[in-house]
Amino acid sequence: MRDKIVAANWKMNKSLPQAIELMQAITFGLKQNPVACKVVIAPPFLYLERVVNETKGLAHAAAQNCCSRNNGAYTGEVSADMIQSVGASYCIVGHSERRKLYAETPDVLEAKLQRCYDHSLTPIFCIGENHAERTENRHFDVVAQQLEYVLFNFGAEEVAKTVIAYEPVWAIGTGLTASPEQAQEMHAFIRKHIADKFGLELADDISILYGGSCNAQNAAGLFAQQDIDGGLIGGAALVADDFLKICNELR
Ligand code: 13P
């Protein structure tokens, strides 16, 4: 049985007092009303250890990124080793903002995935087409290549430890969500592509999350789809009530 997961990606938002307030509201809500899914919170690095310590037993902490290299002279970077050492258990890899704004290439992403596997972090590997690619009907090819150029360079053992997030770039932060049917179609495609390479059993056990303007209103429709195993939530995860509602929609 694959994990059902709702993950919050706080991106570069919240001062420390605001982050603490949000975290406390989320933990309070989860204590009052336990949810049926795994909850993952990816705060900015500065707050990662606090999220680990203050959400213990209720949520898992994730980094939003890690360095492609091991510890060393890389000013400003944070290693998978460090992330593991503060008790976080997940790491987002290949978010479209990092691919686009920080020019992360398939080679870099492959190295980041390797660092995660080496340090027992579960990568949340993000893939998804942009607006032009969808309108030109190239979205399946683009997503297939994103899998093949990076994830498929690993063996079954590593791939089985990976969570995938399908995040169509045109839906991120735009209010334009993929319809449940559009998202299901792509999730089924992703699972089939993994099954063709690694077998049905492995593909069946992989959690594939949807991300891109997922909110308290549309989460139920998305999560009702057979191949959608949860969400990676940006904007709506910055408001505790909305995030908790989304968690409650995953059964
Ligand atoms: P939004 O939910 O704000 O569209 O962001 C999605 C996302 O990028 C999560 O990683």
Image (cartoon, grey):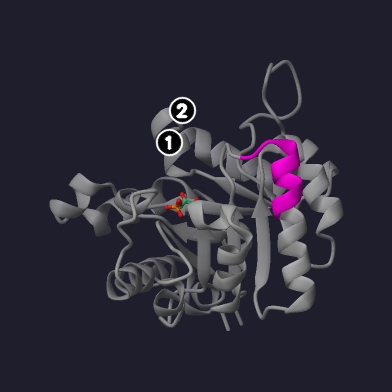
Residue 57 in the image: x percent, y percent?
Answer: 84, 67
Q: What residue do we see at 72% from left, 33% from top? A: 79
Magenta span of residues: 14-22
- Compared across the picture, whether 142 is left or right of 6 comes to left
- Compared across the picture, whether 132 is left or right of 99 comes to left
Residue 46 in the image: x percent, y percent?
Answer: 74, 34
Mark 2: amino acid: Tyr
Quadrant the C terminus occupies: bottom right
Label 1 to label 2: alpha-carbon separation: 6 Å
Query: In this orientation, does residue 119 appear?
Result: no
Reading the image, the residue beneath label 1 is: 99
For residue 13: magenta? no
Q: Quadrant of residue 97?
A: top left
Reading the image, the residue beneath label 2 is: 102
Q: How many marks?
A: 2
Q: What residue do we see at 77% from left, 64% from top? A: 27
Q: Quadrant of residue 111?
A: top right
